[in-house]
Image (cartoon, grey):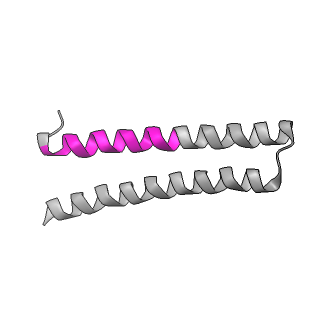
């Protein structure tokens, strides 16, 4: 059983994992659609930047969980 103080971190971790999966699926889908529909390079780059922002946010949130666990140790 998970300790009550780590339940919040666990839930946050699950949400981050879900967000990474959703961002990746949307990115792959947009890339596929862009190739099939002939979108311009600017439009494709926009989706790349949106995906990069999503992955960056997930990395930042993961770092926050790691920091919280480091603070709990000491």
Tell me which residue sits at (63%, 57%) in the image. Answer: 49
What secondary structure is the stretch in magenta mostly built from? helix
Tell me which residue sits at (36%, 39%) in the image. Answer: 14
**Residue 70 quadrant:** bottom left
**Highlighted range, magenta:** 5-21
Name the residue furthest bottom: 74
Query: Which of 67 and 61 lies nearest the eye of the viewer?
Result: 61
Vertical arrangement, residue 44 with respect to residue 74, above or below: above
Tell me which residue sits at (40%, 44%) in the image. Answer: 16
Screen quadrant of the N terminus: top left
Query: Which of 30 and 73 lies nearest the eye of the viewer?
Result: 30
**Residue 24 quadrant:** top right
Screen quadrant of the C terminus: bottom left
Query: Which of 6 and 51 lies nearest the eye of the viewer?
Result: 51
Q: Position of residue 69 (x, y in %)?
A: 22, 57
Q: Position of residue 51 (x, y in %)?
A: 59, 51
Q: Where is residue 41 in the image (x, y as percent from the top left)?
A: 81, 55
Tell me which residue sits at (31%, 44%) in the image. Answer: 12
Q: Is residue 54 left or right of residue 44?
A: left
């Amino acid at each position: 059983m998970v300790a009550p103080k780590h339940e919040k971190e666990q839930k946050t971790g699950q949400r981050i994992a879900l967000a990474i999966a959703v961002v990746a699926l949307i990115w792959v889908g947009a890339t596929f659609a862009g190739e099939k529909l002939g979108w311009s390079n600017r439009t494709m780059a926009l989706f790349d930047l949106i995906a990069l922002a999503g992955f960056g946010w997930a990395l930042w949130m993961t770092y926050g969980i790691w920091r919280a666990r480091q603070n709990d140790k000491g």
